[in-house]
Image (spheres, helix red, strand yellow):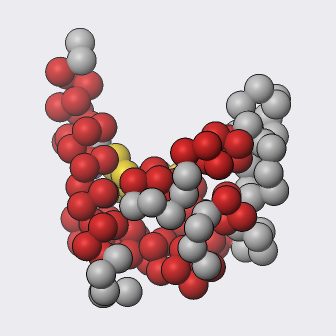
Amino acid sequence: MSDKRDGKIIPEMERQLEERGYAAVPDVLLGIGMLDARKYEEWRKGGVRCLEDQCSADLAKLHAVLRTVKRHAEELGLKPSLARYEAEGRGRMMLRFTKSNDAVLERLYSTHYLDPWKAQEIRRGRR
């Protein structure tokens, strides 16, 4: 997906890496305007079926974002780390990202890409 969306996705990833040492797909979607913060919070509370239903883009565009995030993370040598997304205040209810419940896509959505050196710098600065 080397088009104008890369011009939003990559800077958003860079901002997240600089700010906290990792980038996460849901936060990229928020940052580039494909996901409204109120709809994200509704999903985080377990109030909707899946994150894709909350996004303003179609599935092809959302999946292109996933590919761009993964590709850029690999180019930067970031460490992938699978995150658990559980509904807030609902015990251990796992949140779904996809309409299809596709395991590969679910994994891509829930992967955080860590810059270990930057994360360590940030932790040191907060002590």
What residue is shown at x 80% (from left), y 44% (from top)?
Answer: 47
User: Which residue is located at x 61 percent, y 43 percent?
Assistant: 38
Q: Position of residue 63 (x, y in %)?
A: 54, 77
Q: Position of residue 81 (x, y in %)?
A: 47, 51
Which of 99 and 79 lies nearest the eye of the viewer? Answer: 99
The answer to whether one can see residue 77 in this image is no
**Left or right: residue 66 compared with residue 120:** right
Q: Is residue 107 above or below residue 127?
A: below
Q: Tell me if residue 40 comes above or below residue 120 in the rendering.
A: below
Q: Give the image location of residue 102, x and y in percent.
A: 73, 73
26 sits to left or right of 32: right
Foreground of the two, 127 or 33 = 33
Residue in the picture at 74% in, 58% down: 50
Q: Nearer the viewer, residue 64 or 79?
A: 64
Number of numbered labels in the structure image: 0
Which quarter of the rendered picture does the N terminus lie within? Answer: bottom left
Residue drawn at x 70%, y 47% is 43
For the question of whether residue 30 can be seen, the reply is yes
Q: Residue 52 or 92: which is nearer the viewer?
A: 52
- Residue 49, compared with residue 117, is above or below; it is below
- Locate residue 104: give its quadrant: bottom right
Farthest residue, direction top: 127
- Residue 23: image x %, image y %? 37, 52
Residue 123 found in image quarter: top left
Quadrant in which the C terminus is drawn: top left
